[in-house]
Structures are given as C-alpha cells and as structure tokens.
Image: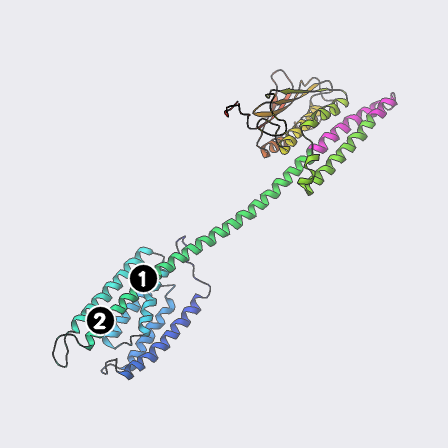
Amino acid sequence: MPASARALPPTWRRTDWIVAGILALASIELTYLADFVGTIDPKHSVHTSAAAAAATSLVLAWRRSRPLLVGVLVSLAYVTVAVLLGLEPYASQVVLFLGVYSIGAWCPDRRRAFLTRTGIVVVMTLWLLYSFVDGFHDPDTGERGVNAYLAFTAIMTLTNIAYFTGAWMFGDRSWAQAIERQHLAAAHAEIRAQQGQLQEQAVRLERLRIARELHDVVAHHVTAMGVQAGAARMLIDRAPGEAAEHLRHVEASSRSAVQELQTMVHTLRDDDASAESLPCLDDLPALVAEADALGGQRVRFERVDARPVHVDAVDGPGALPARAAQLALFRVAQEGLTNARKHAGPRADVVVRLRLEPTRTEVEVSDDGRGCAATPTAGTRMGLVGMREGMDSVGGGLEAGPKPDGGWLVRATVAHEPPRDDEGGRA
C-alpha cells in the first residue's frame, strides 16, 4: 500500500453493503410516497423510477474501493433519473452526497479526486441553471416568470450548493484525518519496535559488561594463582617454607577473587547500594602492591598530579572522574598487569602510572618486555577488546601497542571538564 493510501477498515465491505441496502429500500419507499403526493410527473412509470433509484443506491457498496467510479456513476444516474424518469428529492440527495464525499475521503490520487469533483460540480451547476431558465416558461399557460417550479428549482439549487460544499469539505477532512491516524499508528509501531530493539541492545550491552567484569576479575586473580602455584610446585621439595608462602598467596588471591565476584553480583542486583564498594583509582596502589608481591617481575606505582592546587578531588571541574570511569580505568590497570604477567617475562619491569590533569585522567601500564614468559600462553594479549569496550562505555579512549624501545604500553584516558579561572574563563 502506498504511503499516501488510506487503509480500508476490516469490515468496510459489510458496512457499505448494509448502508447501500438501507438507502435502496429508503429510495424505493420515498419514490412511491413522492408519486403519491404528486411530486413525480405522472407520465413517468413510478416502478421504473423506484428501480432506478434503488440501483443507484446499491452502487454505493463500492464507494470505498472504487470512489471515483462510484462518484461519477451516482452523479450521472442522479441527473439521468431526474430528467427521464422522475426522482424523489430526499434519499437521492443522501446518495449523491455520499458519492461525492467518498471521492474526497477514499481516492488516493488527490489530483484526480479534485478534477473529478470539479467536473461533477460543473455538470450539476449547468443542469441546475438549465432547469432554472426552463422554469421561467410555464408549458400550461405559456407565461414566463416566477412560478412554483422555478421556486422549487431555486430551493434545489441552494440545497445542492450546501450538499456539494459539505461533501467536498467533509471528504477532504476525512481523508486528512485518516492519513494522520495512519501516520501516528505507523510512528507508534516504529517506536514500539525501536523500544524492543533498545531493550535487546541493553541486554546485550549488560551481558558484555558482565563478561568484561568476569574476565578482568577472574583472569587477574587466576593468573596470579597460576604463577604462585607454579613457584610452589618447583620449591616444595627443596624449600618448603617458600613454597608455603607462595601457597598462602594463592589462598589470598582466591579470597580476593571471591570477594570481587560477590561485590560484582551485589552491584548487578542493586547499583545504588553497592557502587561505592567497587574498585576505584584509590585502589591502584594496593593492586600494584599485590602484583609486585607475586615476585619475579618488579612492579611499581607512580602518581603524577598536574592539576591546580585548588581543585576539589571530590567535585567540580578538574576533579576525579565518575565512579564508573574510575572502575573502567582500574580494570584497564588490572588487565594490563595480567597481560604483563603473562607476556612480558619473569624479569620485566612494570610501571602503573596514574596521571591527573586538569582536562583528563590517564592510566598507563608499561613494561620493558625483558625475557620470555616462564609459562608461554597461547594467543596474543587477550582482553584488549574488553578494555576498549569498557573505555568506550564511559566516553574514554584506549591505546595499546609495542613501545619503540621494546615492551608494551597500554594507556587509558578519560576526559573531563577543565577548571575555570577567577574571571570565569577557561584556565
């Protein structure tokens, strides 16, 4: 169906047949009554007039599916029956009104609808003018002037002006309202479809977020436990004390993993109640200390604060980013340390650097990549996709790649509004 076409209602055919049938019966009855009171010329057969009026009414059964054809047929039948057979002036007017109205209300080609109705109005006007002029002559007396027939013609002229004007206006209005309702219904359906798509997208994004959180938490602690367990296995025979110390680190890492998983589950149940318990930038030193305690690699933390001294660390321009952004930065540092442990080698130097600037907050994880990993792992540095998605979700950016002098660098950045100077301008 074209975008400008008016949709047919489900029961249109039955409704139109009922209306056409009622008008046909009314036309028959009113034709006989008009003959009884003498408004139909006795020289015409009343039975033929009634049959013609009924047939004209039944044409309205197709007024919605074929509005142009029905409008033209009804108008021609109206004039023909009135001239040749005699026509009752009541039900026939309703039939003519519906015929012209249906052109405006149901014809999808608005230009053809306009031209057809204009043609009908012109023909009807010429016929009425002819009747008006002919009414000046009385065939019985031969006199010319105002008589009863002329008065009747004047009444019919005024009535038809009102009928055609109303049919034209109401038809156009019905069309416009129907098209507007269709557009609203289509917009509503589109909104409902988009709402469903947004809900599905929200579910997918939430699944990705949960997957990233699980990967960051589990991978970090499992990597640490794997390193400590491997060291304990090699030392258990010749240095049981050191092996026991490594096993204690395994135990501590497992507890930390369980605690973070529980925190994440609580956050999924109630973000407002558990958001404060999630890791943030203040937890970076502890994260670095935990990684350094695993042994082998030398891991250190650096903090560079380039913000003005008057900046409030809690609120205001230039302050620390929101909790969600801090969590994303923390996860980047956590994943960067995990990848460094896997790929940089046991003797690598790893630096986690937190840089606080007036316009952004930045976290770097850098290693020099000395030596090979004690236990080679398959694949490349996995988790970069998750880190990038996590930073994208908070409006940040991520850079990752090899350094010119060797090693690997991961840098995550979150921009925020810079502080203003005393005069209200940008600092």
Q: Position of residue 306 (x, y in %)?
A: 60, 20
Q: Residue at x 12, y 75 (%)?
A: 144
Q: Hey, what amino acid is under mark 1?
A: Trp
Asked whether 126 or 12 is in front, the reply is 126
Q: CA distance from mark 2 to mark 1?
A: 21 Å
Q: From the viewer's perspective, is 287 left or right of 310?
A: right
- What is the chief secondary structure element of the magenta stretch? helix
Q: Residue at x 46, y 66 (%)?
A: 11
> Mark 2: which secondary structure?
helix
Display colour scheme:
rainbow
Question: From the viewer's perspective, is the residue at label 2 or at label 1 nearer?
Answer: 2
Q: Return the residue nearer the eye: 423 or 289.
A: 423
Q: Quadrant of the N terminus?
A: bottom left
Q: Is residue 53 above or below residue 399?
A: below
- The magenta region covers 216-245
At label 2, which amino acid type do we have?
Answer: Ala
Task: Describe residue 385's horizontal placement relative to residue 144 as left or right.
Answer: right
Residue 109 numbered tag: none
Residue 212's place in the image compared with 21, above or below, is: above
Labelled disc at residue 168: 1
Please name the residue that numbered disc 2 is placed on: 154
Estimate the x, y position of residue 83 in percent, counting from the top left.
23, 74
